[in-house]
Amino acid sequence: MTIDINVRSDSAIDLLPQLEEALDRMAAGDTLRLVTSRDPDASHQQFAERRADQFAWQTVRSGPDEWEIEITSRAHVVDARPTLAAGGEPFDEIMRAAGQVAPGEVLVVLAPFDPVPLQGVLGAQGFSYDCQPFGDDFRVVFRLG
């Protein structure tokens, strides 16, 4: 799947939340095509700091009037918050997603708390764990190897 974002007048600061929101909706292998009238280098650097290992960034066309970037997701994202809010248990969904993670990809879990038990379960399967605050919630990245 390809998502297109055409931003010709917004500032680079406004661009970052749009990119992050789109990336969280994408499946591993999906591509976001960004066309902008501003050099996206600052957004790329901020995005890389906040979402390391979760995307591949390729410049297709580079200014001076227009830039075209393809951002490909390398993340399997599970948003556990709606399931938990409804009183459900997202463990099976998370484990299915973990089973699909290929070399060079990551598993991202969005949760209202730091899901420490997953660290042990997925650690036993060869995943490392990094948990970061995400607003009032947490973004947990699991990497194989």
Image (cartoon, rainbow, N blue to C red):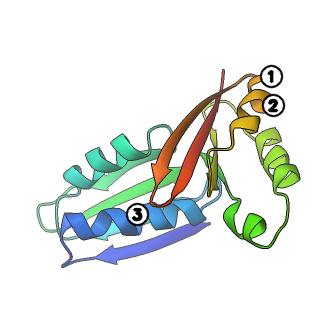
Find residue 51 and report its horizontal and vertical position in percent.
Answer: 44, 45
Q: Earlier in the sequence, mark 3 or mark 2?
A: 3
Q: Nearer the viewer, mark 1 or mark 3?
A: 1
Residue farthest along the left direction in this orientation? 64
Position of the C terminus, as image quadrant, is: top right
Q: Are marks 3 and 2 in contact (CB under 8 Å)?
A: no
Q: Are marks 1 and 3 in contact (CB under 8 Å)?
A: no
Is residue 45 left or right of 47 when viewed as pictured?
left
For label 1, the SS is: loop
For label 2, the SS is: helix
Disc 1: CA contacts within 10 A as few (<14), some (14-19) or many (>=20): few
The amino acid on which the numbered mark 3 sits, given as a three-letter code, is Leu
The amino acid on which the numbered mark 1 sits, given as a three-letter code, is Ala
Find residue 11 and report its horizontal and vertical position in percent.
Answer: 18, 70
- Say which residue label 1 marks: 124
Q: What number is the disc on residue 121?
A: 2
Q: Give the residue drawn at x 34%, y 41%.
A: 49
Find residue 34 and report its horizontal and vertical position in percent.
Answer: 36, 66
Give the spatial CA distance, label 1 vs label 2.
5 Å
Q: What number is the disc on residue 19?
A: 3
Disc 3: CA contacts within 10 A as few (<14), some (14-19) or many (>=20): some
Find residue 79 and report its horizontal and vertical position in percent.
Answer: 67, 60
Q: Earlier in the sequence, mark 1 or mark 3?
A: 3
Disc 2: CA contacts within 10 A as few (<14), some (14-19) or many (>=20): few
Is residue 87 left or right of 2 when viewed as pictured?
right
Between 22 and 6, the residue placed more toward the observer is: 22
Q: Give the residue drawn at x 51%, y 52%.
A: 72
